[in-house]
Image: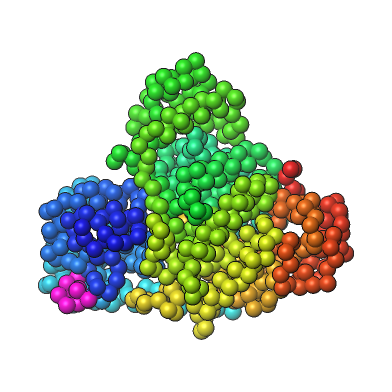
Amino acid sequence: MNRLAEETSPYLQQHKDNPVDWYPWGDEAFARARDEDKPILLSVGYAACHWCHVMAHESFEDGETAAVMNDLFVNIKVDREERPDVDAIYMEAVQALTGHGGWPMTVFLTPDGRPYFGGTYYPKTARHGLPGFTEVLRAMAAVWDNQRDDAVGQADQLTAALGRAAEIAPSGAPLPGPEAIAAGRNTLLSRFDNRWGGFGPAPKFPQPDLLELLLRAYVRDGDQDTLGMVTVTLDAMAAGGMYDHLGGGFARYSTDSQWLVPHFEKMLTDQGLLIGVYLHAWQLTGEDRWLQVLTETIEYVRRDLRHPDGGFFSSEDADSEGVEGKFYVWSESDVRSLLGDGADEAIAWWGVTAGGNFEGWNILYRPVFGELARSSAVEDSRRILFEAREKRVRPGLDDKVLTEWNGLFLASLAQAAAATGRDDWLSDARAAGEFLLANLRRPDGRWLRAWQGGKPGRHLAFAADYAAMVDAFTHLAEATGEARWVAEARTTADAMLELFWDDKAGGLFTNGNDAKALITRSKDLIDNAVPSANGNAAQALLRLGALVGEGYYSQRGEDILGLLAGLIGQHPTAFSRALAGADMVASGVTEIAVVGEIDELVRAVQRRYLPNAVLAWGEPYPSPLFDDRKDGLAYVCRDYACQAPVSDVDSLVAQLGSTPAVSG
């Protein structure tokens, strides 16, 4: 075993028996590099990453390659999900050097951590235009030994360019208004794939926050083309092989333009963000097929990614038995053998053929968009195939619990439970909140990034973790009517602003002021696979400020938007979560208070798509929304100026406006 044996990350544990003398990220590795005047080889990946496994099998498990690595470098292995701060800094360097990025990421550093060369996957021996890994290793060690000035000069230039996002100052531009929503909508329309949905060519990622942006735009413009982009994309994703038609849930992305062939790993973040957009689309349109998708996706997470005590695991691998997608694919003969007389209908329903659609196998999909409601016969076939699949060797499970990812999922789960009236979902949402508080927050109140196998990780939580938990706690309060979740949101927000706030320019640094310094202190500003820390925090702070009537939170949210205002105007789709916050400011937050136990009034609000509203009900907590209010009444306010109180659903609905509500 090497030094990874005691790490809590399942990804690092995968490498503990490598012949490579791996170090985790930390002082020990850098001290050795300085003492021996050796460069550092930094390898970054994650447990569900297919090409990370390929490089591990080819090189890191190979004794000859490991000997070269151990002789020439101090080797550090990082789980990008545990250390997104490290990953972001060096990914920026790799993208600057090569024009692209990805995982596994391979970066060569000076002993003090500055990058001088980098790339992604390298095969063991040269092929497809890529140099062999040992060839790269020897070349980079030679540069360090024989061209030290060039290496240090390159490192100086790259390091100076890193973290420039943290140097952005407020431009003085006004906060974006409705015109920015419209501009984002128009940008997406220009990139929209009318046939298959989504934006741009393959590979295609779900990009749920862009779909959320379009739902906001549709509420404003009522343009059917706006809604059509959402409809086509949601239907195409749910029809394609990227969606698991037997067990629910979505793969990470599609390798083709049709959403047919996925990269098979399933990530908790994608499930959380996608159930959010399917939920909101269902609330807005009442389309039952989208309720089916969000229900099956939530049930997948509850079944396969939930810790018995309440938290949610990170991901399932793309590979099983060393083969990508093996768990999910079928031959026509297997389907016929299992289903007997029911095979023909199921084969037609899921597009199964003798030749298959993926390396001779069949990825199940729906050939017809928008038709997901299964007949009883097809449902019986689904159950039979699912039960047969459960007997296969499952993909690897990354069972660490990440604070940020759980917060993102919890926010969507709480909203879905409230909108559908599913008490079992609400119970799981509560349990998740309790689990996170018990296991990922230290007694002194400091949140941690990860937990695994009964042990909290050693890494402090980042701004993204805090932002996600503020958002999750406010949604949990709105779903349950329990005051304690508002208190937890305030406590977390206060700590976030104390630990991460930039007193000079505004906005949140990625790392807290109590964290060990990296080569630069960066800010997470641009939305990627998950919302940026600053965009999510802006929206969460605005919602919290409206719930508790505390201008400090709202102002900090607006300060973040002010920092980003010029950038949002230029690139609205890169800042969709922040743009949602700007829409809240431009529209004004609608504050709804239901005083007393009036379930029908609460449900009337929870069933509706109200992206710029907050709901206070149930147990009172310190807030103007509860001050001097009478039991049995609902109050609809904006900036604490309220309409006449009402006691019946029809009057409340009239005050909420024209946004429809789903039945139930």
Query: Depth check: 39 or 443 in front?
Result: 443
Query: Depth check: 634 or 374 in front?
Result: 634
Residue at x 51%, y 18% (from the top left corner): 342
Q: Viewed as shown, does residue 193 lie left or right of 159?
A: right
Q: Main secondary structure of the magenta part?
A: helix
Query: Depth check: 332 or 619 in front?
Result: 619
| Residue 38 is one of the magenta-drawn residues | yes
Query: Depth check: 317 or 199 in front?
Result: 317
Residue at x 30%, y 39% (from the top left corner): 321
| Residue 460 is one of the magenta-drawn residues | no
Query: What quarter of the picture does the C terminus occupy?
Result: top right
Expressed as whole percent of the image width and height from the top left, the position of residue 601 reads: 79, 54
Residue at x 38%, y 36% (from the top left corner): 327
267 is higher (above) or lower (below) than 42? above
Q: Viewed as shown, does residue 204 lie left or right of 628?
A: left
46 is higher (above) or lower (below) than 114? above
Query: What quarter of the picture does the N terminus occupy?
Result: bottom left
632 is higher (above) or lower (below) than 265? below
Residue 658 visible to an observer of this rendering: no
- Numbered range of the magenta stretch: 31-39
Q: Viewed as shown, does residue 220 lie left or right of 517?
A: right
| Outermost top residue | 341
Expressed as whole percent of the image width and height from the top left, the position of residue 34 reads: 19, 77
Residue 248 visible to an observer of this rendering: yes
Expressed as whole percent of the image width and height from the top left, the position of residue 214 reads: 62, 53
